[in-house]
Each structure stands twice: as C-alpha cells, then as structure tokens.
Image: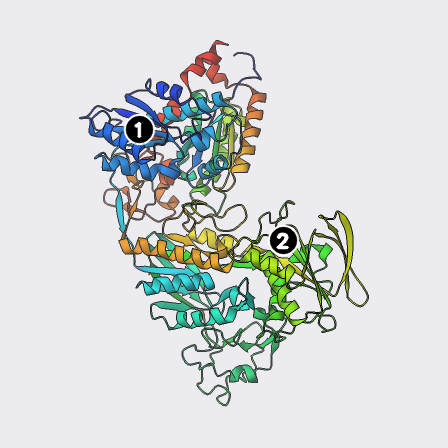
Amino acid sequence: MSNTINTDEEIKIGIYVCHCGINIAGVIDTTTLTEYAKTLPNVSLSKEYTFMCSSIGQEMIKEDINKGLINRVVVAACSPRMHEPTFRTVVREAGLNEFLFEQANIREHASWVNLNDSEGALKIAKDHVRMAVAKLNELKPLEVELVKVEPTCLIIGAGIAGMYASLDLAQEGYDVYLVEKEPTIGGHMAQLDKTFPTMDCSACILTPKMVDVEREEKIHLMTYSEVDNVDGYVGNFDVTIKKKPHYIDQEACTGCGACAIECPVICGNEFELSIGTRKAAYIPFPQAIPGKYTIDMIKCIKCGICASPDVCEPDAIRLDQKPEYIDVKVGTIIVATGWDLYDPTELKQYGYGKYPNVITGLEMERLLSSYGPLEGKPVRPSDLKPPHVLGFLQCVGSRDFRPGKNKYCSRVCCMYATKQARQYKEKHPEASVYIFYTDIRAFGKGYEEFYESAGENFNIKFIRGRIGELYENKDHSLIVRAEDTFLQKQIEIKLDMLVLSCGLEPRHDSDQLASLLTIQKSSDGFFMEAHPKLRPVDTLTSGIFIAGVAQGPKDIPDTVAQAKGAASSAATLMAKGEFEIEPYYSIVLEEKCSGCKSCQSLCPFNAISFDVFKNIAVINKALCKGCGTCVAACPSDAIVQNHFSDDQIFAMINTAIPPLAKTENGGK
Amino acid sequence: MAKVKEDYDPYILGICCNWCTYAGADQAGTSRMQRPANLRILRVMCGGRMEPIMVLQALKNGADGVLVSHCHAGDCHYVEGNLKTFRKMPLFIKMLGQFGINPKRVKYTQVSASEGAELTEIVKEFVKELKEIGPNPLKMEE
C-alpha cells in the first residue's frame, strides 16, 4: 500500500496545544510543548490557547485552514473520546476532510495522572504529540458512512422507566417493542405502598400509567418475554424476542380468574416476596397489566382441572404451548431493566433468615401495603402481633468498603426507611420507632423537610450508628447493641422487629444482557453511561440507551426523568433518520489476497465473504464494524483498516520512542 | 551490553483498545489517579487489531516495556475480537525468550472502561518490574 496521501499537495500540519484552563497548563509547560511541536516533520505552525474547544479556539483552527496555512490538524488536549467529534466538525466546516485530524491526549493520560510531576507529564505529552504527528502524516481522507435509522425502538424492562420511555416514544409516533420478563408490567414500583416524600400511593399513580401503556397502539407490549439475541448496529438492530409460554392463550383469556380459583396448587407469590400466596394459575396482583392469567409450569401438577370447559369457558388453556420466537428490526434500544434487592442473608450478624423478626425493607413495604397480604396492618412474623418497638437499620448492603461488597450508596434507603417508620407511627402512634443510620441522605426535593418532620412530628428516633451486635430472646424479640456516635455511648435496645434497609443491586442477569448488547458495566456492576455528566443516558454503543436503576441507584423522580431523557435521545436519532458511522471498515487488497480464507472465520460479524471466481476475500463494508481482527490475522498483509492501517500504526510505533532518550541511554 | 541500571526511567508503550483499556485510562485521568510518568498509549479500536509484530517493533525501537491491554472476555465491543488476541498474545510472550528478549518486557492485561484504578496499579507494578530487569539492551546497542 502506498504511503503517500494527497500527492498533489504538500502536507502542512497545524498543532494546537490546549491549556484546558489549568487542567493541562497547571502541570505541563505548554509553551515548551508548543515550541517542541514546531520541530516535528511537516509542521507548519504550532499555537497554544486556554480552551481550544471554545468558539475562539475553534475559530483559530478554521482561520488557519482558510488562510491555507495548514491542511491537517493536531489538537493536543483532552481524550479524543471527549472532543474528537468537536474538532472533526471544526475541520469539516473549514472545508478539510474531517479525518485529516488527530488528537493527542495530554490531559487524561498526562497532566491529570502526573499532577506533581511536571517534567514527566511534559515528556509524555511530547511523545503523544509526536505520535499524533506521525499518524497524521500517514492519514488519508475518508468519507463518513450514513446508515438509515429504523423508526422503531426496543425497550427492555417495563418498570416505571421502561413505561415512561415507551409512552413518550409512542406519543412521538414511533413504534415501541416493550419487552418484560414478568407476566405483568409495573416493575418494582408496583410493589411499593406509598412513595416519599408526598406519601401518595404508588398504585394510584402507577396503575393508570400501566393502563395507558396497554392501550397505546404504538406500544407492542410483550410480557413474559425475554430478549434472546441482538445483531446488527445502530439504526438496524435485528432482535429476537423469546415469548415464554403462558400455557394460556392470551388472546382468548378473559381474565375471569376461574382457573386460579379451581387450581389446587398453592405456592408463594413472588410479587408478595412469598409473604402471600398464589395458585399455579395466577396473575401476580389484581391490577396486573395485561390482566391475563399465566400457569407456572414448575409448580403445576398437571391435574388438568383448569382445562375443563366447565372451568375455562373461553377454552384458553394450552398446556402444550411452546416458546415463540419473534424477530423484529429496531433502530434504537433502551435498557431499563431495573434492580435486585440486596440479599442480606450473607451478613450473618443481622440474622436475616434465622431470626423470624428480622425482615427486609421491601418485605416491610408489602406488610404496609393496603393491597398487600396483610391489608396494611403490619405484624411481626413470630407471633403476628404489631411490634411495640420497631427498628430500622440503614446501609445494609450499601456503603460497605470490605472487598466484594457494594461500596456505593443506594440513595433510596434513608428515605424509604423514614417513610416506612412514619407510616407505622401513623398506624401505631404508641409504638417506639428507631432508625440506626450512618448518615441521613435526604437529597431530593422535599426530602429534607420530610426527614425533619419525621423526627419532630412523628417522634421517630434517629440514632447515628450501625448495629454492632444482635441477639434473639426466647420470645423472638431482639436485643441490639449499637454505638450512638453523637453521644459516643454504647446503647442497648430491645426491639420487637428489625427492618433491614437493604440497598439496590444490579440485576443478577445483567452480565448476560451486557454481552448480548455489547454495552459496558461500571465497577459497581450497573450499566455504564458514555459520560458520567454529559452523556448520562447514552452507552458507548451507538443507538443503545440506559434508564432507571439499571444505570445506578435512583429514586422514582430521577428514574422517570432519566427515562424521558433516554426516550428523547432515542427519538433524536430516529427523527433524523440517519446516523453517521466512522468509516473504519477494512478493505481487501485484491492483488495481495491469496485466498486462504483465514479472515473469514475470524470475523465476528460475518462481514467477509469469498469470491470464488477471483479467489479472494471480500468485505461487506456495511456489515464490517471496524475491529480490525482480520487485518491482524491476514498472513499476506492483504487487508487494510481505514484510519488504523499498518502504515499509520507503525508510523506511531516508529516515532514513539524519543530519539534523544535513545542516545542518552546509549551513551551511558 | 551496558551494565543494568536500576534508576533509569523505563519507557513503556501501551497498545490499548478504544472501548475498554483506553477508556479505563481516561477514567484514571478523570479520577486523578496518580501513576509514574512512564506510559504512553497508542490507541487501536479493538484487541483483535493488536499484532505481535507491533510489540516486537516497539521493543526493537528501544521501548523498555510494552503493555498490551484490552477488554475482559465477554466485554468486547466487537463481540469477540479480544478472544483472538487471547490466543495470540500468551503464545507470543512465551516465544519472546527464544528471541533473546526478556518476556517480562511485555505485559498482557485486561482492563475494562471502569478499571482506572486497576490500570494505575498495573503501571506501577510494571515500572517496578522494569526497573528490576533494567533498560532494554536493544536501546543501548545503538
């Protein structure tokens, strides 16, 4: 492959060193760097400025291009993952090919990791600039590829986040496939009784929205379904959805419930966290959407009673139903898969699972719920009497810095415990309620006021200190010992019941989904956003967005806000109708290809076919995603990856090691 | 060959994939995790693009160490590009000894986009190891 580019034109490189305020200039001597850059091959000019990404900085570049002083650009600044698109636009607007640009990372990889080593940071910065110039000398103009974006969105998870995203997109006119694992939509919010800080009932605000989702024509609701496979790329995802068998024809079922009445199998209801029961033929809760029944085949004893025409009048029972696989094509995907509650069994010191009167916050929620198994009259499990002294323990499974534990704050537990404590006091004003906390985090609108009022108007006692020891008495009451860290005093309290305010965890199956969608997870295990501040709903995979607790613990208002944000981002992409993809695809050089087919089996995207007449491999550039695996594997060097060719990479490697250092060390 | 010098400043070239390790290095920067100033990073899109010859070329040019790093298995942005390198790199590192190159000069790791702290530790450790084994003799022969 030829090394020369734009043979008709001399290469004139402009280098722009950014101070990034003091982020770079506070550590690196930018003047020395700018002067150094002038000595590099084909560099026509080198300048420095406070903020290259500002409009003034951008104009500097444009002006120099327009005056004909330069025809290629290096910006030495932040990570290209941050501002490469910005500067490419600048280069394009000035009339140059946008791929004749290279960014040298002197902030994330130099100044910020060497705050106390100016010399070291300068050395790294010089190397990065020199490598960028070397690559730029080899770069070729490329054309951006446009792909069409299908105006359809797949939303995974139909909790409050998935529902709101679906409704927004449907109302904007896009078709939505809303896939939910459970037989009903609503997610965890349906399990909650009241919501802080307004104390409005969760069901009252949620169920009307659930009905809206079911009624909305543009939303293709697929409950009891899972995403089985995802192929393709932004704008053109091919998705296979597995519809698990309900064993009841969902079209024919009228939701009369006769099957559940007659079903002889009684088992724990997962929706009630097994505090309540259901039959093998069931709906999780009366307001479930769709209000159609499902048979749990693991629990079913196959007695066939429900299938008799006397029981099921519409003849909807299908005990031999098989899973159904449905293929859909979507342009965008929103992941709103929610969370799992932290299982406190492993924290043996709190006795969950061993002492009957230790329960989790979500179990308390069902005990308090007016449509829960106890109709809103919470009792302690050991003797079914309302507890006189009730305790809450905060930060169970959160803010735990021991290895393998959840270090993050789950953000909702302070408020839900305060809310539950207040609800209990409303029902039993004579009871004593204690909350053992680490710090109270009442961060949201109206939360601090809610917390203040809990102490002042409801006499809930907040004790700053975690429970150190816990014992059970013969009557199943609990002795807890803790340190009141404000009074610096050991305290011992006898509780009738203890609620563990468990944190939120990433779903147990989130690894599978992450690899299916090729999206990343952050170190806490939740799905990772493309930028923690500026791209909070995007993932690093174009066309896939995240919303709700799937991205990180958050309360209902934040979840809804993020869901609407994700819907809006997906809509932006679909409204435009096309998406620019980086043309980093690979090309086979016909004259070099020996037809060995090594590349063909390596391609993860089946983008390589074989031309039997020419005896060469052929890459379909629409399918190629530009990983370059085939390039690395080709024994004949017959494949070239755009923008990452051997010429370009080796130019960088060959200039990477500073010539000065070589002689210095060589001389010693 | 010159005498091994322990107080030299090892030159490390990193060859990192865009989606995991390069992003992890960005995260280390954003979080201001301090590390010795020894690592420069060359970005390629995927672990699958990494070739042993790139590492050899860097060593030949006088790099004291080469850090090859990409996504963990199952994390690859291109589904399985990294798995190809999983097969290539360990074999290549074994062969280095036969070329007369200390295999410790090449570090092969997996660092995800959220593992800036891990990368920082890897670099610190690598610098320490390289100081122990001394400068690249190829550099000194020039």
Q: Which residue sits furthest top?
A: A667
Q: Residue at x 32, y 38 (%)?
A: A86
Q: Residues within 10 Å of mark 2 (few under 14, many from 20)?
A: many
Q: Which residue sits furthest bottom?
A: A310
The quadrant of the image that shows the N terminus of chain A is: top left
Q: Secondary structure at mark 2?
A: loop
Q: Is residue A399 left or right of residue A85?
A: right
State whether discs 1 and 2 lie on one chain.
yes
Q: Is residue A505 left or right of residue A252?
A: right
The circle on residue A397 is 2
- Give the residue number, with chain letter if any, for mark 1: A136
Question: Given the image, on which type of amino acid does mark 1 rest?
Answer: Leu
Establish if A169 lies above or below A9: below
Q: Which residue sits furthest right?
A: A474
Q: Residue A253 sits in which quadrant?
A: bottom left
The mark nearer the N terminus, 1 or 2, is: 1
Which of the chains bears the disc numbered 1? A
Question: Given the image, on which type of amino acid does mark 2 rest?
Answer: Gly
Q: Which residue sits furthest front?
A: A456
- Please indicate, yes or no, whether residue A647 appears anywhere in the rendered image: no
Establish if A557 lies above or below A320: above
Q: Secondary structure at mark 1?
A: helix
Which of the chains bears the disc numbered 2? A
Q: Residues within 10 Å of mark 1 (few under 14, many from 20)?
A: many
Towards the viewer: A329 or A482:
A482
